[in-house]
Image (cartoon, helix red, strand yellow):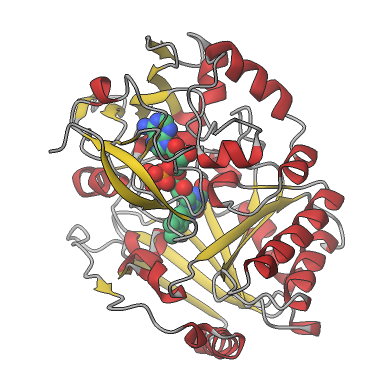
């Protein structure tokens, strides 16, 4: 256990940018947040949202503060420290018949990170974001006070913190209701889909009867095949469908080294995408699967972020309003491909209602997320993200801050009309701008 700040290199999951910073880590979260400029959890945000505003501003790593503080088996109400990970909650609760109300696509996240990004999952069209299930937060605010807030106590502070990217206070404890599940296994159906229109129709139609849906898209397919992919639908299996035994721990393999840059060329990604699509030769597949395979397929490969090589990668995620002709999503995929973009991980999802957090990402529409390598010439990556952002602005959409590394402040300001109100509440609680991140310096005009 280290109680004093130590100098280290820090980065998000995309491994770009990498900065030198002062990190401090202890089980005593209350104490180490007294002088902190920012908190970070397991660093699964992709870009610079969990990085310090400057190299001398201490960042609290919350992961040692992971105690479960209270659990009511009648209501499912759980109170835990902010550094508790979803992976730990799954280990403890799944076999006992409970699951979080909303889960992102990796379990290596902390509760603090889930609140700060107001994460969404495959059930967003039914259950909204994680923050909507949170009933209370304990926060250390910028003037050093510890404040309890909830949807009814200090509601403004609560809703600015949900999705507020750690910029409104350090989250010490989180209270929310776990969900009862009928069995700890998932009933899954996957379907091969020939093009974008069919994919969006499939997502919308299955939303009526399936609590969890998502699509993988071959973003290198062009013309009539644009948007082809695999539609995944799931629900918790009934006890009479599920195996008797609880799901065991999944084996993980690790990426052993950083492959050279050429391994992830457009050509190799095209091959991967074609094979992945072709492998699903049966039109529809139905099966009972391990919850990790359904919720967290990428977690099966440890350090998979290394496959993008030394320069790292970014994920571009936006949500585009619905349109009868699916034009916005089509134009985004076309633009991405025409600008030389290539990704083997392109995920599509129909979002439900707008999140209640003041700058939460989701809104009704189609969300598209694409991973891509940071180019040797950084300007090329910047150029691509700028063009994508211009399109998103034209279409009336917005981007997801927890994935972002390259958005320009003018673009973000234009696509985020809620920003003024967010900043006003932020300043009320932190007039001197003590809580900052590298992302808030880049995007919100905070000083270094
Ligand atoms: C493979 C993969 C799949 C993903 N899938 C999804 C998905 O389906 N849906 C989705 O919404 N997101 C998804 N994400 C993103 C991820 O859920 C978020 O970035 C989440 O916030 C990461 O949690 P963390 O604990 O790693 O936080 P970090 O990455 O360490 O920090 C993220 C943000 O939270 C803030 N923060 C963290 N802890 C605290 C605290 N105690 N107090 C105040 N602020 C804090 C940080 O300052 C930062 O702004 C995915 C990420 C990966 C790598």
Determine whether, in the image, residue 42 is placed left or right of residue 228.
left
> Residue 405: where, in percent of width, then height?
58, 53
**Image quadrant for the C terminus?**
top right
At a point 68% along the width and 75% down the height, the residue shown is 341
At a point 60% along the width and 16% down the height, the residue shown is 427
Give the vertical position of 48 relative to 331 (above or below): above
**Image quadrant for the N terminus?**
top left
Determine whether, in the image, residue 338 is placed left or right of residue 219.
right
At a point 67% along the width and 53% down the height, the residue shown is 318
Q: Quadrant of residue 79?
A: top left
> Residue 92: where, in percent of width, then height?
19, 44
Number of disc labels: 0
Determine whether, in the image, residue 438 is placed left or right of residue 135.
right
> Residue 117: where, in percent of width, then height?
50, 39
Rendered-image quarter of ligand 1: top left
At a point 75% along the width and 60% down the height, the residue shown is 388
- Nearest the eye: 15 or 332: 15
Determine whether, in the image, residue 169 is placed left or right of residue 81.
right
For the question of whether residue 130 can be seen, the reply is: no
């Amino acid at each position: 256990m280290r109680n004093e700040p130590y100098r280290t290199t820090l980065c998000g999951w995309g491994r770009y940018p990498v900065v030198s910073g002062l990190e401090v880590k202890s089980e005593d979260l209350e104490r180490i947040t007294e002088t902190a400029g920012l908190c970070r959890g397991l660093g699964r945000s992709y870009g610079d949202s969990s990085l310090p505003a400057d190299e001398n501003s201490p960042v609290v790593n919350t992961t040692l503060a992971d105690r479960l503080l209270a659990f009511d088996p009648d209501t499912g109400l759980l109170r835990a420290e902010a550094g508790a990970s979803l992976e730990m909650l799954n280990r403890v609760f799944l076999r006992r018949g409970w699951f979080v109300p909303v889960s992102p696509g990796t379990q290596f996240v902390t509760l603090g990170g889930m609140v700060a990004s107001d994460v969404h999952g495959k059930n967003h069209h039914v259950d909204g974001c994680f923050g909507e299930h949170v009933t209370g937060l304990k926060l250390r605010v910028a003037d050093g006070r510890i404040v309890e807030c909830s949807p009814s106590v200090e509601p403004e502070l609560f809703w600015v913190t949900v999705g507020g990217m750690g910029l409104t206070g350090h989250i010490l404890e989180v209270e929310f209701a776990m969900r009862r599940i009928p069995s700890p296994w998932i009933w899954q159906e996957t379907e091969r889909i020939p093009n974008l229109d069919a994919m969006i129709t499939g997502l919308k139609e299955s939303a009526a009867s399936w609590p969890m849906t998502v699509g993988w898209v071959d973003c290198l397919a062009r013309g009539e095949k644009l948007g082809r992919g695999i539609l995944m639908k799931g629900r918790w299996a009934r006890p009479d469908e599920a195996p008797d035994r609880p799901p065991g721990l999944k084996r993980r393999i690790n990426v052993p080294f950083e492959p050279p840059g050429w391994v992830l060329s457009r050509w190799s990604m095209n091959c991967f995408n074609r094979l992945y699509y072709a492998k699903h030769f049966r039109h529809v597949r139905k099966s009972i699967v391990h919850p990790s395979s359904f919720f967290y397929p990428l977690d099966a490969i440890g350090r998979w972020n290394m496959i993008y090589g030394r320069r790292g990668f970014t994920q571009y995620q936006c949500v585009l309003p619905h349109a009868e002709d699916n034009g916005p999503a089509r134009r985004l995929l076309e633009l991405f491909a025409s600008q030389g973009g290539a990704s083997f991980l392109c995920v599509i999802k129909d979002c439900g209602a707008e999140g209640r957090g003041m700058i939460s990402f989701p809104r009704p529409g189609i969300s598209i997320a694409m991973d891509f390598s940071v180019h040797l010439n950084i300007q090329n990556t910047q150029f691509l993200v700028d063009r994508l952002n211009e399109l998103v602005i034209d279409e009336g959409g917005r981007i997801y801050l927890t994935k972002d590394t390259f958005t320009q402040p003018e673009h973000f300001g234009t696509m985020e009309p809620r920003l003024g109100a967010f900043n006003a509440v932020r300043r009320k609680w932190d007039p001197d701008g003590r809580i900052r991140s590298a992302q808030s310096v880049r995007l919100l005009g905070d000083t270094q």
